[in-house]
Amino acid sequence: MTSHRTPGDSLSASLRPLVAARMTEMAVPGAIVLVETPEGTWTDAFGTRRIGVDDPVTVDDHVRVGSNTKTMTGTVLLQLVDAGLLGLDDPVSRYRPDVPDGDRITVAQLLEMRSGLPSYTLLESFNQVLDDDPGRAWDPEELVAVGLAEPASFAPGTAWEYSNTNTVLAGLIVEQLTGRPLGTVMRERIFEPLGMAETSLPAVDDAAIPEPHPHGYLFGTNVSTLTPAGTVLPDDEQAAARSGALRPGDQTALNPSWGWAAGAAISTVRDLATYVHALVGGGLLSDQLQRRRLDSIPPPDPVAPDSAAYGLALARFGPMLGHDGSLPGYQSFMGHDPDRGITLITVTTLQFGPAGEQPANELAKTILGELYRS
């Protein structure tokens, strides 16, 4: 019998050992990877759904996708711009008079992270509540109130700062203009048209993940991960984590409503691949607005072509356009390179590795290094 190797087999042979090795280095319990190239597709799952239990992760498992949600909120808001319900240059005060300096902050600046509104998620007091009451259901208005109570980081449009307050405000504006829950708007305008049957933005009182799903883990606490140094374990604990002697805490039951429009969506790698292809390649917005969205991302720096940049709820990581996501228990990356026709999705069931790594991002870097080697 003659055996025939497919392009997917070739990708598996070259990439699977690299992924497995990086997972071991970062003490990652489980991961799922999808790679699409013009030559073929490789999708694979690694590890176990629950530490210490023989329950393999599968490619169909659901995971929390964190800040990839921001692109979904940004997309439905831009669709409302296409529909003439608001303008990107409108002042935020037209829709939210309670926003300080809102007459100088534009809708576009919310999506571009250039409003100057600080992120409520950077406050130690907020993260302490997450640690003390992980099951709490947060109303989006509560989240905005926490962020707006803090002094502005800078004058609108003069700098850039990643802030969940921006995206929660954007989500509330979507609900205000449509009169419908944000999750419903996303389903009707993005998920159903693209056939993303396994993707959802759950209600704020819903902390469940659809089956099948892996458990999600975190070394430390929300408070301890507020700074990069806080995500790095001491050397002896790093060694113990890699050997399995030190186990991360199970964060699966955490209610993600604290992220809402900025981070609470649930999906699968196949759905994310479908989505990021349309997000970057077009089909969700008018051609004119899609071009403006892509043009909103600063071009690559010739000195550092692999650097990251941000635009209208869309990011660039080297040659790929998309986003990443991080929240207790899970980390994820989705990217599409429209020039070479490459799509990459990585998800992990650990938010930070022992040395402070973002595991899904590190897996993405490893895979991209191999794919773009030639």
Image (spheres, helix red, strand yellow):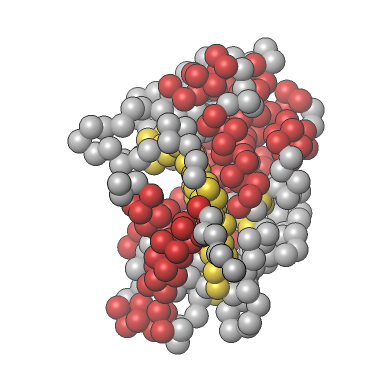
Residue 23 lies, with reference to residue 296, above or below; the image says below
Q: Is residue 113 above or below residue 366?
A: above
Residue 97 can be seen in this image = no
Relative horizontal placement of residue 368, taking residue 249 as reference (left or right): left
At 50% from the left and 28% from the top, the residue drawn is 312
Quadrant containing the N terminus in the rendered view: bottom right
Task: Work out whether 322 lies above or below 326.
Answer: above
Judge by depth and name the residue closer to the eye, 309 or 320.
320
Q: Nearer the viewer, residue 314 or 346?
A: 346
Q: How many marks?
A: 0
Farthest-out residue, front: 1
* Left or right: where 87 falls relative to 353: right
Q: Residue furthest left?
A: 303
Pinpoint residue 269: horizontal percent, then vertical percent. 61, 52
Outermost bottom residue: 245
Residue lying at 33% horizontally and 27% vertically, measured from the top left: 299
Residue drawn at x 73%, y 23% is 177
179 and 315: which one is in front? Answer: 315
Residue 355 seen in render: yes
18 over 168 or under it: above or below: below
Q: Residue at x 23, y 32 (%)?
A: 302
Q: Position of residue 211 (x, y in %)?
A: 75, 63
Residue 140 figure quarter: top right
Where does the image place residue 275, in percent across and percent down from the top left? 62, 39
